[in-house]
Amino acid sequence: MKTNEQTNKQKKGAKMATYGVKTWRKVDFYEVIKTPKDQIIGLSFPRSDLNLGLEPSILSVLPDGDNVHYDMKNRDHNDCNVQLYLCSVYISGMEEFVSWAQRHDTSKIVVGGYHPTTFPEDFERYAFKIVQGPCDDIWGTIKQPGKVVKGIVNHKRVPRRDLYDIKYNQQIIPDKKPKDVVVSINTSQGCAMKPPCDFCCTPIMCPILLSRPLEAVEKEVRSLVQYKPKFLFIRDENFTMQKDWTERLQIIHGLLPKTKIYLFASANTLKEPALQEMAKQGVYMICLGLEDITVEYTKNRTLDQVVRWMKNNGIMTYLSFIVNPHKVIGREAGKDFYDKLMSRFHELAPEMVCGNFLMPFRGTALWDQYYAFVSPEDYKFYDSKTPFLIRNPIVREKMQFFMFWYQWKYYTSDFYNNNVRKFETGDTLHLRFLELYDQFSAKYQKIWNVRP
Ligand code: SF4
C-alpha cells in the first residue's frame, strides 16, 4: 500500500519531469529580471490574420533597435517593461483595441492608421499621441506638439521585416501554391483621382499621391531578394497613377527577375504600350476595380478595352466588385443584380473575381447617404464580407451566401474552365473556394427555407 508521503513524492517527481528544473516561480522571476525595461512594441488591430496576411503596415513605423518587437497576437504586456506601444488601428479593430488599451498605460500608447486619422476624437482617452496619415519617422512625429499630429514621412527606412515571419504571408491568387513565398511592397501611398471614387477611403487617408523616392524603393527591393519570392504584390492603391511607374517596375523586376508581380491600377491610367511594358517587366496580374456594376465610374470608361489589351499581352485580370446590400434586397432585385454581374464576367472573362460588400467610410461622397445606417457596433464588421447595412440577420446570411455562390458558379462554369483557365489547380484561389464551399453549403442547408 502506498503511503501519502510516497504519493506526494511521485506527484512532485511528475511535476519536475514536466517542467524541468524550473518551478513556475523561478521561470517568472527570471523572465521578469531579464526583460529589458525600454521595449517598444508594435501591434496591429485587428490582429494579423495568420491565414490571409501580408506584412503589417506597422513594420514601416517601427524604429531601429533590439528593444523593438512586433506582437502578432496583441498580448497584454507589463507596462513597467515598455516605453512605447505603437498601435495601428483599422476601423474593424477598434473594439479589440479599446479592450486592450484599457488594460495598459495609455500615456505610453501611440495610435495611427485609418481609424485614428478619420476619428481622432475616439482615441483621446486611449493614447497620448494620435497620428494622422502615413508615417515612417516615429520619433520626429511624436516630438511634435499637441495630441493629434500629422505623420512625418522621410522615406529613409526599410520596414522591419526582421520582426516578422514572412511565412505568414498568404495571398489568395491564381497559380500561387500554399508554400510559395509572397512579399509585398509600397512604392507610393494615396490616390489623386479627381473626383475620388465615391466609396473609396484611400484619398481620406492620403489625398495626394505620395511616391517614395526611387532609391528608397531600390533599397527595399534589395532587402527582399533574400526571401526568393515567387510572387510580389505592389500594394500601392493605384500604381500606374505615378508618372515614373515604369522605372519603379524596372527596379523591382531587375532585382527579382523570376518573381511574378501583381498590382492595383485604375483602367483610366492604362494604354496598350503600358501593358506591353508591364508584361515584359514580370507583371502577371492587374487588379482592376469593377466596383458596383450599377454605377458608372470615371476611371472605368475604358475598362473593356483595357482588359482586352491585358489579354493580348498575357496579363491576368483580377476584378474586385462591390455589392451594395441595399440594392439586392428581395429575390427580384438580387437576381437582377447578379444576372448583370455574371454578364459582365462573361464579357470580361477575368481570371479572378473578388466580391466586397459596400462599407461607407466617413469623408467619402457616399457617407452622407449612409451614415444613418452605421453605428459604432458595426465597426467590427468593416471586413467587406459582412453586409452590415442590413439589420435582419437572415437577410445578411442570405446575402453572404449569394455573394459566394455566384463567384463559385463562375469559377466552376464551363465558360471559365474552357475559355479562361482551369479552376482546379490546387492554388490558393482554388483551395480557398473549397473551404468557402464547405462553410457555405452548411449555411445554405440551414437558411434556404427560412423566410426573413
Ligand atoms: S482610383 Fe482606386 S484608389 Fe483612387 S479613388 Fe478610385 S478606387 Fe480609390
Image (cartoon, helix red, strand yellow):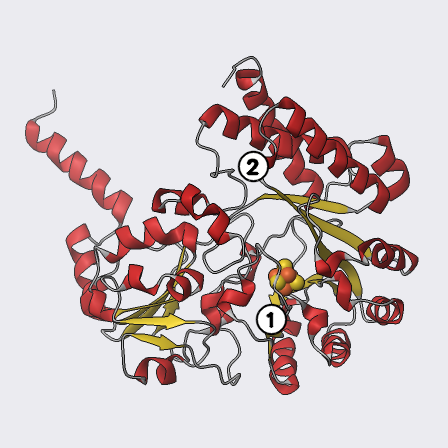
Mark 1, ligand 1, within 8 Å: the answer is no
Mark 2, ligand 1, within 8 Å: the answer is no
Q: Is residue 400 left or right of residue 318?
A: left
Residue that protrudes farthest toward the right in the picture: 312
Q: Nearer the viewer, mark 1 or mark 2?
A: 2
- What residue is drawn where x is 82% and y is 69%? 278
Cα distance between the residues tagged 1 and 2: 32 Å
Residue that protrudes farthest toward the left in the picture: 4
Q: Which residue is mark 1?
A: 186
Residue 182 visible from this viewpoint: no
Give the number of the disc on residue 241: none
- From the top left corner, tell me how far across and down residue 65 is, in percent: 38, 80
- From the top left corner, tell me how far across and down residue 310 is, in percent: 85, 58
- What residue is drawn where x is 76% and y is 50%? 175
The secondary structure type at the circle numbered 2 is: helix
- What residue is drawn where x is 22% and y is 45%? 16
Residue that protrudes farthest toward the front in the picture: 369
Residue 381 sits in which quadrant?
A: top left
Establish if 428 lies above or below 119. Answer: above
- From the top left corner, tell me how far across and down residue 102 is, in percent: 22, 55
Q: Amino acid at mark 1?
A: Asn
Q: Is residue 102 left or right of residue 92?
A: left
Give the number of the disc on residue 325: 2
Residue 84 sits in which quadrant?
A: bottom left
For the residue pair 155 and 49, the one nearer the viewer reads as: 155
Other-residue count near label 2 (Cα within 10 Å), few / some / many at <14 / 14–19 / ≥20:
many
Q: Amino acid at mark 2?
A: Pro
The secondary structure type at the circle numbered 1 is: loop
For the residue pair 336 and 165, the one nearer the viewer reads as: 336
**Which badge, 1 or 2, comes first in the chain's sequence?**
1
